């Protein structure tokens, strides 16, 4: 009887051990999933990727580019974003097809992305270019979302909150940069010399001082030495030399173009000097 009880106890322990081992094997069993993909940020300057899912976005404002040496001939701007594999490293070429989609409530900007982004063997991150064209309207924001076309890609859906990269394109007056808060403040601060705000008029000032002249050209220098000084009453648009320089540039433009420089509504660009 005692031997039978011992034998039964041993069988019971062996059975429990087998069940326990089976459970442990199930718990540590490796899960082999398909490769997902996510958008990430990419800095072309530092060549670094960053995973900031709350800020998968970029904005291009062409207003800052009028002080360049090309003047009114604004060139396309190129920005960058990235893709990152979620899952096992690829052991062969992985192709990710992109598509550009509109954002509700906004017109679609003129942007282009590569048809495919390739991730090669052992590569889990790749950057891609987004080429943005200058929008046709001033002071208006255009938006697009870049998505993965999974039906034509070698990957599956990654993390839900990393599935879109938003691009905003505009040619909007940077009020803070020119030391005012809005159009009314512009008129109050500069109207005595410049007249009422106009998007073409304001950009003309950057083109004019950017090409040549008394302040040497860059966007930030013009903001500091023309607009800031004007706002502080230290000179700027009150400076007789600046006034002569602006007037001469406008006369030259009108003669070369064959018609007066005008705002989108047809109002001729004029200054109060």
Image: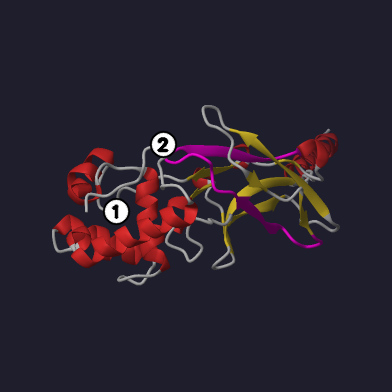
> Measured along the vertical axis of the image, is residue 226 above or below residue 81?
below
Q: CA distance from mark 1 to mark 2?
A: 24 Å
Mark 2, residues whose alpha carbon is within 10 Å: few (<14), some, or many (≥20)?
few
Asked whether residue 253 is drawn in magenta, I would say: no
Q: Secondary structure at mark 1?
A: loop
Question: In the rendered image, which quarter contains the N terminus?
Answer: top right
Give x and y (percent) for residue 132: 59, 50
Give x and y (percent) for residue 174: 36, 49
**Residue at coordinates 30% horizontally, 43% vertically from top-left?**
197
Relative to 164, 98 lies left or right: right
**Residue at coordinates 19% horizontally, 64% vertically from top-left?**
240
Between disc 1 and disc 2, the foreground one is: 2
Rendered image quadrant of residue 77: bottom right
What mark, if any, has residue 178 been given in the picture?
1
Which region shows up in magenta? Answer: 120-149
Q: Secondary structure at mark 2?
A: loop
> Measured along the vertical axis of the image, is residue 9 above or below residue 83?
above
Q: Which residue is mark 2?
A: 266
> Measured along the vertical axis of the image, is residue 248 above or below residue 174?
below
Relative to 45, 2 lies left or right: right
Question: In the rendered image, which quarter contains the C terminus?
Answer: bottom left
């Amino acid at each position: 009887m005692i031997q039978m009880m011992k034998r039964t106890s041993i069988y019971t322990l062996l059975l429990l051990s087998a069940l326990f081992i089976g459970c442990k094997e199930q718990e540590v069993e490796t899960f082999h999933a398909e490769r997902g993909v996510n958008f990430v940020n990419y800095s072309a300057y530092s060549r670094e990727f960053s995973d900031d899912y709350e800020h998968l976005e970029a904005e291009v404002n062409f207003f800052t580019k009028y002080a360049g040496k090309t003047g009114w001939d604004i060139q396309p701007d190129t920005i960058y974003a990235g893709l990152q594999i979620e899952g096992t490293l690829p052991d062969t070429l992985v192709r990710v097809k992109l598509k550009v989609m509109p954002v509700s409530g906004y017109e679609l900007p003129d942007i282009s992305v590569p048809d495919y982004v390739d991730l090669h063997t052992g590569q889990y991150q790749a950057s891609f270019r987004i080429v943005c064209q200058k929008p046709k309207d001033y002071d208006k924001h255009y938006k697009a979302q870049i998505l993965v076309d999974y039906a034509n890609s070698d990957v599956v859906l990654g993390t839900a909150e990393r599935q879109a990269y938003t691009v905003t394109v505009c040619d909007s007056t940077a009020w803070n940069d020119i030391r005012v808060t809005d159009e009314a403040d512009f008129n109050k601060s500069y109207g005595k010399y410049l007249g009422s705000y106009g998007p073409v008029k304001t950009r003309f000032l950057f083109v004019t001082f950017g090409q040549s002249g008394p302040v040497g050209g860059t966007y930030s220098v013009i903001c500091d030495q023309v607009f800031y000084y004007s706002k502080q009453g230290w000179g700027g648009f009150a400076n007789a030399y600046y006034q002569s320089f602006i007037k001469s540039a406008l006369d030259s433009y009108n003669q070369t173009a064959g018609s007066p420089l005008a705002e989108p509504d047809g109002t001729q660009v004029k200054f109060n000097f």
